Each structure stands twice: as C-alpha cells, then as structure tokens.
Image: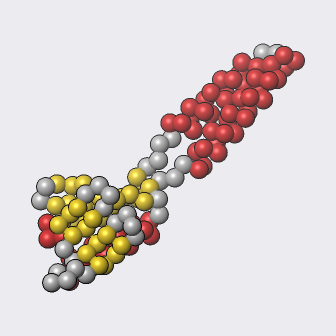
Amino acid sequence: MEEKIYYDNGDVKVTNTRVVTNKQTYVLKNISLVESEKTASSSCLPVGVIIAGIGTAALGSGSLKNGWPFILTGLILVGMGVYLAKMSTSGYVVKITTNSGNSIAYTSYTKSEVDNVIRAINQAIIEN
C-alpha cells in the first residue's frame, strides 16, 4: 500500500501510517488522542525590566539636578519592559496521546498551523 500524505509543512508530516515531527515519529494506529493547547509566555523578563526601571528612576528622584540621568534611564527601562510584555507571544502545541503516554509533538506560534496539523492527523485516523 502506498503512503498517502495528508499534511507536510517541512516540520510535520502526517501520512496514513505515521506522524513525523522534528522530535519523534508516531505510529498512527497507536495514537488515541490529539489535542491543541495554548502555552503561556514567560513574563519574568518584562516584569524584571520594569522593576529595574522603577528602582533606577527612584534613585535619581532624590536630586533632580544630578539625578536626571537615573530618572531618564529608569523611564527608558520601564518603556522597554512594557514593550517586551506586549511583544511576548504565546505559542500553541499539538499534544499526542499514545499507549506510552502524552507528549508534545509540535509547537507553533500560530493557532491555524496547529489546527491544520490536528485536522490532518484526525483525518488520517478516520480514513485508516
């Protein structure tokens, strides 16, 4: 029987017999559940930069004549922290459950990409 490709984006390949990712190969008949999950982005760096900016600005607030470089640097750090917080993005993962347990098979920053992979895996399972 010839292998039918349901999906192939270079990172993930779904066929009628297997799912191949960068990390691992999954035998299609062993897959019992496929689901997506949103991963949270880390907010440690942006919060740390904002706190450092507030602290730096507070150091300069004692004397406006000599402290303006600290206040300016602090404001710049706060701005950078806010920018980093807005730019940090969440990701999406494809979770595959087999008789061996759960594993994260694929990660993407776009939900549509993960949905396409899941749709292809489910279609391959149904047709085979």
Residue 90 relative to residue 25: left or right: right
| Image vertical order of residue 64 relative to residue 45, above or below | above
Q: Position of residue 22 (x, y in %)?
A: 32, 58
Which residue lies at the image location 42% right of the left edge and 60% below the top edge?
Answer: 108
The answer to which image quadrant residue 54 occupies is top right
The quadrant the C terminus occupies is bottom left
Q: Position of residue 24 (x, y in %)?
A: 25, 57
Looking at the image, residue 108 sits to the left or right of residue 16; the answer is right
Q: Nearer the viewer, residue 116 or 70?
A: 116
As displayed, is residue 92 above or below residue 81?
Answer: below
Q: How many labels does the image show?
A: 0
Visible residue check, residue 122 = no
Q: Residue furthest front?
A: 2
The reply to whether residue 56 is in sight is yes
From the viewer's side, name the closer residue of 3 and 102.
Answer: 3
Residue 71 drawn at (x, y percent)? 77, 26
Task: Pinpoint residue 31: horizontal percent, then vertical percent.
Answer: 18, 66
Q: Residue furthest left?
A: 99
Q: In which quarter of the image is residue 81?
A: top right
**Residue at x 60% of width, y 49% of height:** 86
Say left or right for 46 vs 34: right
